[in-house]
Image (tube, rainbow, N blue to C red):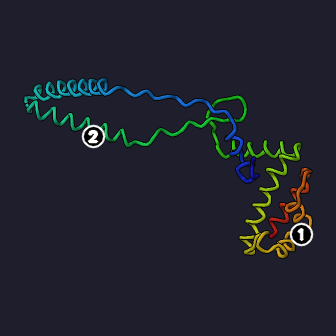
Amino acid sequence: MSDGGLDDLFGIAESRHTVEEPETVVKRRTLGVTLAINVAIIAAATVVVTAGLRSVGMSISLLLLVALLTGLRLVIHAVSMVAPPPPPRLRSRIGSDAAPAADALRAAVRRWEQNLDRAHSDPDLHSRNVLPVLAEMTDERLRLRHGITRASDPRRARELLGDDLWSALSGPTRRSLKPRDVETYLDTMERL
């Protein structure tokens, strides 16, 4: 059961109930394969560095070169272990395209519009999603502008909101509001 908060309106609650695609499993290499690959990399680097130094007439101890390359490989491995994970690929859940979402804000607004459109035709969805959000916004506006909420000082809140908005927010309403009613209520909230 939903509590009808902002999460419902913004689609977070909807995403809790959707079937998600299984995560891709990252297969780890066995320790033996990893060591063999690292030994091959160090051996190849040793051959290249030794050949390069000898071509210019210089030499270095083979043991020192292997130790340096092993240390370098360990540092590279340590850095790769603490590297941040790759950023998630954004996919648009709106429409049938699976292309990355160009604008996350636009996608969120589309989700809000879809939820509000569905709420106009379904009074139960309206009373679970839209009215609690309007109530939260009203309480926040009252708190910011007047230092009260509907619960802390109901008499003063009712005076500020007017009887229509007060009854719409506090009464158990099973009918959905008309767009002009919502517009009137939002205008009242903005004037607070």
Q: Residue at x 69, y 36 (%)?
A: 18
Identify residue for label 1.
162
Q: Which quarter of the rendering shows the C terminus?
A: bottom right
Q: Is residue 129 above or below residue 70?
A: below
Q: Position of residue 93 (x, y in %)?
A: 68, 35
Report the front residue among 167 and 140. Answer: 167
Q: Position of residue 143 (x, y in %)?
A: 73, 70
Residue extending furthest front?
A: 1
Quarter-of-image position of residue 77: top left
The answer to whether 121 appears left or right of 34 in the picture is right
Q: Residue at x 61, y 34 (%)?
A: 100
Mark 1 packing: few (<14 Cα in 10 Å), some, or many (20+)?
Answer: few
**Any part of residue 184 in sight:** no
Q: Is residue 190 above or below residue 22?
A: below
The answer to whether 68 appears left or right of 23 in the picture is left
Residue 75's disc number? 2
Quarter-of-image position of residue 186: bottom right
First in residue order: circle 1 vs circle 2: 2
Q: Residue at x 20, y 34 (%)?
A: 69
**Any part of residue 88 in sight:** yes
Compute the Cα span from label 1 to label 2. Answer: 68 Å
Amino acid at pointer 1: Gly
Amino acid at pointer 2: Val
